[in-house]
Amino acid sequence: MSKIAKIPVTIKEGVTAVISNGTITVTGQKGSLSFAIPAGIEVKEEEGNLVISQKEKNKEETKALFGLVRSLVFNMVEGVSTGFNKNLELSGVGYRAQALGDTLTLSLGFSHPVIVKGEQGITFSVAENVITVSGIDKALVGNTAAKIRALRPPEPYKGKGIKYQGERIRRKVGKAAKAVGVK
């Protein structure tokens, strides 16, 4: 039995959760998210908490989904109350970013600017070569940030590219540095 799934999800102030027809809908000040509860998993509201349980104990199909459903519900409650952010750093000569609403324009050394259109619920902001991807859906924010990073991943020789804030790039020595050390 999952240790994570046993912990009840606390419903924060200003957040409402409605469970009906196998779907949970969480609404807060930032927006609303819904999720279809898999068969064999039960979600109940008890004393301001959401309790996740298996309909049949120790069934292999639901055992795997037990902790996942709890994590998804927790992320929904977090998202509609505070939201999620991912920060990306641009490093390289001439690398620039401009945000205009849900559109991000990137100059990454290609012959043309790269335009990234955010999905519904995703917003971009840029400050001093740091791109912030914001939204209420954690998976959508993470996927959008990963797609932006994949446009020009950091390379190990000079460290140029797009990286997550706080990410450490393993640097390699170049050909010239290797040749000097070997005789």
Image (cartoon, rainbow, N blue to C red):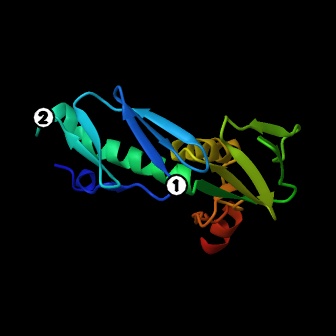
Which secondary structure, mark 2? loop
> Which quadrant does the C terminus fall into?
bottom right
Residue 161 appears anywhere in the view: no
Q: Amino acid at mark 1?
A: Gly
Q: Which residue is mark 1?
A: 14
Question: What residue do we see at 33% from left, 42% from top?
Answer: 69
Marks 1/2: CA–CA distance: 33 Å
Which secondary structure, mark 1? loop
Q: Are marks 1 and 2 in contact (CB under 8 Å)?
A: no
Instruction: Give how far across and how far down residue 163 sits, in percent.
Output: 65, 57
| Residue 161 occupies quadrant | bottom right
Residue 126 appears anywhere in the view: yes
Q: Amino acid at mark 2?
A: Glu
Instruction: Give how far across and how far down residue 60 sits, in percent.
Output: 15, 34
Residue placed most toward the observer, 51 or 158: 51
Q: Which residue is mark 2?
A: 56
| Residue 102 occupies quadrant | top right
Instruction: Give how far across and how far down residue 148 sits, in percent.
Output: 68, 44
| Neighbours of disc 2 within 10 Å: few (<14), some (14-19), many (20+) | few
User: From the viewer's perspective, is the residue at label 1 or at label 2 nearer?
Assistant: 1
Q: Which mark is residue 160?
A: none
| Neighbours of disc 1 within 10 Å: few (<14), some (14-19), many (20+) | few
Residue placed most toward the observer, 162 or 54: 54
Question: What residue do we see at 84% from left, 47% from top?
Answer: 109
Question: What residue do we see at 64% from left, 41% from top?
Answer: 147
- Which of disc 2 and disc 1 is earlier in sequence? 1
Is 66 displayed left or right of 181 in the figure? Answer: left
Query: In the rendered view, would you say 61 is above or below 152?
Result: above
Question: What residue do we see at 58% from left, 66% from top?
Answer: 168
Is 65 displayed left or right of 20 in the figure? Answer: left
Instruction: Give how far across and how far down residue 110 sits, in percent.
Output: 84, 41
Q: Residue furthest front?
A: 47
